[in-house]
Each structure stands twice: as C-alpha cells, then as structure tokens.
Amino acid sequence: MQEKSIPAQEVLKELKTKLEKDLSFNSGKIIGSMCTNPHPIAKKAFCLYIDKNLGDPGLFPATAEMEREVIKALGALLSNPNAVGHIVTGGTEANILALWAARNLSRQEEGKKEVILPVSAHYSFEKAADLLGLKLVKVGLNKNFQINLEEVRKVISSKTLAIVGVAGTTDLGVVDPIPELSEIAEKNDIYLHVDAAFGGFVLPFLKELGYNVPEFDFKLSGVSSITIDPHKMGLAPIPAGGILFRSNELRNAISMRVSYLAGGEMEQATLTGTRSGASLIAVWAVMRCLGWEGYRKVVSHCMFLTEKLVNAIGEVNGVEVVVPPIMNVIGLKSEVFDIKKIAKELRLRGWAVSLFPSHIRIVIMPHVKEEHVESFIKDLKDIVRKMSG
Ligand SMILES: Cc1ncc(COP(=O)(O)O)c(C=O)c1O
C-alpha cells in the first residue's frame, strides 16, 4: 500500500483499467462456466445491504430471519419445507459441511471413515476428506455416466460413513440414480448426501416443464442432506451456496456455541464466522422476484438453447455429444479430432470453454443468448473444417 491517500474517482479509474482483461458474462463468450450474471434485483439488494453480517445474528436478527425463510423456500423446492441449513460460500463449503455432519454423527462408531462417491463427483470432496480425515472410495460409472450401483453395493462395509450422489455432475450434468442410492443408504443405515449444487435450481423446474426428471431430493427418505447453490442457476451473486439438512438433529452435529457476540450466546453451524448477509439478502430478493414462474422461464430458455446447440452439433462432422444432456450442460467429444486442439482453437477465438480429460464442457447459463449459440456453432464448424483439410 502506498503512503498517500488517492481520491476515490482516481481509484475507480484505476480499477476499470486493471480489470479490463477479465471476461464478462455479457459478452456471451463465457460458455463453460456454472456461474452467471446475477439478476438485477440480486445485484441491487447485495449493494444496498452490504454491511449485514449473518455471523452475528444478535445484531442482525432480521437478516437471520430471512435466512430461515430462504432455507424454508429451498426446502420446499426440494420437497421438505422443514429442512434446516444455511446459505454459505458455495458448493465446496456446503459439501464440506455435509461430510462434517456425517462424520460427527458417527463419531461413536470407531473406524467409520469411508465415503463412497462416483468418480464424477466434484473435487470439493477431496478437500472435505483431507480436512476431516476421511477416505474417499471412488466408484466407476455406468454407460450413462452415472454411479455404478453394483460397485457401490460391493464396496459398502462397516467402515462406510457416507455415500454421495450427484444431481447434476460438474462435467456432464448427469443425475446419479438417487432413489437406488437412497434405498441402499437406508438399508445399511448410512448417511446419504446429494450434491445438487448445479441441479438443485434446474431439476425441480424441468419437472414442472414436463421433462422426465428422476427423483433426487428429500422426497426420498434416505437423503440426509443436499447442496444447492444459488450462485449457479439461482442467479444470485457470488458467494451463495446452500446446504440443507433433513432435520435439525443432523445440523446440530456441527453446531457450536459462541458466547461473546453482542446479541448474547448463539450457535453456529458454518465454516466461516463472519459471513455475508448481503449474499443471503440477494438470494431472498431474487427468489422473491422470480418465483417458480420466473425460474421455470429461465430453465426453459436455457434448455431451448441447449437443444438448439445439440441439434447443430449433429451437423458437425467428427464432433458429437458425450451423452444426451439432461440439463443445460453439454459434453462435446470427437473420435476424429484431438478435442484439446478444438478447445484451444475455440479459446483463441475468445470462447471460454471448460476442458475435461476427454471432452469439452459447454454450460448454457442464463447469460448465453441465441446469437451467442449461433456464433459458437459457426466458429466450431469453421475450426473443424480447417482441421479436416
Ligand atoms: C456438482 C458441484 N458441486 C460442487 C461444486 C463446488 O461449488 P463452488 O465452486 O461454489 O464451491 C461445483 C462447482 O462447479 C459443482 O459442479
């Protein structure tokens, strides 16, 4: 930091220049991210209430009350209005909290350290396992890229602490067979966490739109907790992840008493102490503003463009989708071309696509417009044509 103060106007000018290299969602070029431009009401609410601290509910009882309202609404979205939980920093924290609760609940039972999950699970579970001293038992996938249930049954043992199923995998948006996992979990008395960080704000609306959507939420009695992230398809500003537990008893497993805060003694069940009330208020505002109707429209439009892109890929020789998409996540692979080279060429043309070991991931988020999809297809066709000859 320099010694002398600098006028705010000058600092703002500096910021503008310094941040020029960042991509913007409005450009439509970010076509491989699970984040998006927040809804205008969410931006507004975030800025208006930037000073709120959910970590000190004695000072901000109204904000704390709004968190309970948001959790209730998310619970209703996931078939359990009595669910409890928190708006946290993101899917990573939510997944860590879930496994933390599972570990604490089974503390009495020596040697329970293994977490069974698909190889497609998000890397946040690696962080959780490292922090919590757990061992991940990774299970392969079936031909639909879902967790292989036979393998799950084989690796269950007295050491199994939890099972994780994913409703909207990071790489392909695939939904694991959660009803079967729920049955297995109940039969063996094992904690089941569902990572619906992405799918949580998509699947309930897809169902309403008439898509054939598998059960994945608290309707299934074996499901103990669910991650659902407002800062992905919920159109909320970062940071806003969500963790929901079926009941308070599960959440209590990670709750701690804090004695010194101004509102008196309170309890806390998040990783962070001081945490953004603005994030939560922004989530409340965007959910209130959009309602089921608004989110249905958002999801419907994303799926319309997803289907448009999938149909167009059908006309690109040598490139195909990995699996027909269930939601607005598309994997592109090639038996003919080096997919890494295609990704490189796309990036050279400004397309921010994600690259997985054997495919390119496209995510049609709400900021992606029809003209962006058309321009992407044009570029992809051109790249493939040049690579062919
Ligand atoms: C399925 C899934 N779970 C968890 C996460 C982690 O979320 P975050 O980046 O908000 O921590 C992601 C991120 O993309 C994800 O796709």
Image: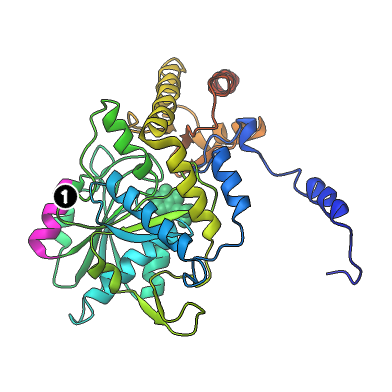
Task: Decide whether the magenta segment is chiefly helix, strand or loop.
Answer: helix
- Residue 47 in percent (x, y) is at 63, 51
- Examine the rendering and report whether any part of residue 123 can be seen: no
Above/below status of 38 relative to 158: above
Which region shows up in magenta?
A: 179-189
Q: Quadrant of the N terminus?
A: bottom right
Give residue 322's quadrant in the image: top left
The residue to which callout 1 is attached is: 220
Nearer to us in this view, 184 or 300: 300
Residue type indicated by callout 1: Leu
Nearer to us in this view, 48 or 160: 48
- Which residue is drawn at the image coordinates 41% and 60% (left, top)? 65
How many residues crowd mark 1 within 10 Å: few (<14), some (14–19), many (20+)?
some
Instruction: Report whether 50 appears left or right of 257.
Output: right
Above/below status of 178 relative to 301: below
- Residue 110 in percent (x, y) is at 19, 82
- Examine the rendering and report whether any part of residue 339 can be seen: yes
- Which residue is drawn at the image coordinates 23% and 70% (left, top)? 249
Give residue 325's quadrant in the image: top left
Q: Is residue 187 magenta?
A: yes
Q: Residue furthest right?
A: 4
- Residue 169 in percent (x, y) is at 36, 45
Q: Secondary structure at mark 1?
A: loop
Q: Is residue 47 magenta?
A: no
